Amino acid sequence: MTTLLRIPITNVFGQGDYSVTLHLGSEKSPVNLLLDTGSSTLVVKSTTYQANLDKKLTPSTAVQEVNYGVGGWNGPVIFTSINIHEHCHKSDHPQSIAKSPSMNLSNAPVALVHSDKQSKTFGDADGILGLAYHHLNKSFDFSDYFTEHKITPALSYPWPFSHEVSEDLVSFKKLMWKYPEHDVTPYFTLLEEQQLSANKFAFYSKRSAIHVNKSHSNKIHKIPSDELAKDPLNKGLLILGGGEEQTDLYQGEFQSIKVEHDVYYNVDLKSVQVGTSKPVIAEPLNQKHLKSYFTNAIIDTGAGGIVLTAEIYQQVINDLIAYNANFAQCLAPFKEMSAQLVGIDMDELKLEQWPTIYFNFVSEPATANTEEKIVQLACTPETYWQINTPNYDKACFRLLSQLPQWPNQSIIGLPLLNNYYVVFDRSKDKTGVVKFAQQKVEHISA
């Protein structure tokens, strides 16, 4: 019997992105890991985890490197125990349906990051829990390198590379590709393969930025995470091994989007529409990027904004200003990413005047006998704008334009997901579906 766990998550460690607590190694060290369907590696700061105390740690000859577009890291692959249920007591989690809830893994791969600079990629979190598929979880066997350079022990942990070598991620990546590559089985895939979890998980969230309430409005120093975590708006839920049975979290029917490729959660975005404006067509992914990125959009729980291609973003901005010329003043600061750290005054915003933005996805591709089916999902002003962030009485716009050098692929992050209860059902068809239902409750019960 597989386990179903309903686990509390919070957005206070990831600057708006949600994290879950796992326990690693013989010391069961608690680590807060960002939930990321846009990557596949379980990676932690070695300082938080205290690998040197772990009696269950088994080193390897493998190394990994991941770049997220806004930061990256490299480090050794080790194997140790991963525990997720000790802080999830059944009395607190009545939806845990197994007789003895347990998703313990005894010898699971974990990547370690030693560099303080690289660790800043995770914000105040301790690392990332990648929830995508194995194709994104590559490692490289450095056995020959260790022999050639007379490194003893011939292992990647303790990390044998100098600061100069490992900090230059571009050069280090070139070095890695000289050695044999193999995919590491991701954490959630291991749970499913070992029949500890059904091949699905669900995600319930409210925000894409930390909510700061009035009681914190006069604080000069940084607000402690434990205080922010008490705010219901900064809480969420991760359901491992289930989804549809959590009927207190959603209402109505699910709408399904086909996952086109099991690399990222790759989906086909057809268009974006501001209110009743003419839909903005989402062009297919550029041919030169097909082998690496596959489709023109991905569903990404690890993205605190919706990142649109430059063309779609500009037209959405134009349509918003055409809808109401007064919007231009509110939007202008957010041409720069730095505005997310400052925000605008909420009294400028007049949130009730802003339109809903609709995203149209392929639900079922056309076949010889059927037409293409489209699903429309709504992103409300309350989620593409975040109020009371980064401080009380401030607001931030959470639609972003693509990064330089990024392909014409939109990243569908938290501002859209916050509107729904979302089930990532990897068991359907060959590559899975992502299912969306209207949230039912304001209150989150873990």
Image (cartoon, rainbow, N blue to C red):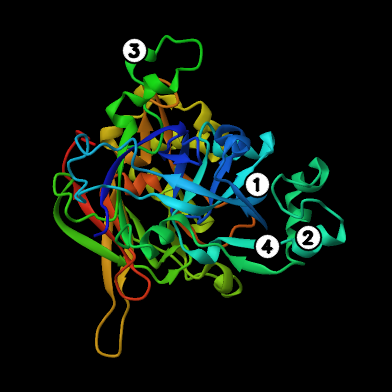
Q: Is residue 97 rendered to the left or right of residue 88?
A: left
Residue at 68%, 62% in the rendered image: 140
Give the residue type at disc 3. Ser
Marks 1 and 2, the one that precedes in the sequence: 1
- Which disc is residue 73 wearing? 1
Q: Which of marks 2 and 3 is in front?
A: 2
Give the residue type at disc 2. Leu
Q: Do the residues labelled 2 and 3 touch (CB within 8 Å)?
A: no
Location of residue 172 (image quadrant): bottom right
Marks 2 and 3, the one that precedes in the sequence: 2
**Residue that extends furthest to the bottom in the rendered view of this protein:** 368
Where disc 3 sits, the SS reads helix
Residue at 87%, 56% in the rendered image: 149
Give the residue type at disc 1. Trp
Q: Badge 3 is on which residue?
A: 215
* Whether residue 200 can be seen here: yes
Location of residue 329 (image quadrant): top left
Where disc 4 sits, the SS reads strand
Distance (Cα) linking label 1 and label 2: 14 Å
Q: Badge 4 is on which residue?
A: 140
Distance (Cα) linking label 4 and label 2: 10 Å
Q: Do the residues labelled 1 and 2 touch (CB within 8 Å)?
A: no
In the rendered image, residue 171, in percent from the top left (x then y), is placed at 79, 55
In the rendered image, residue 416, in percent from the top left (x then y), is placed at 34, 49
Q: Is residue 99 rendered to the left or right of residue 314?
A: left
Instruction: Give 318 or 343, whichever is nearer the viewer.
Output: 343
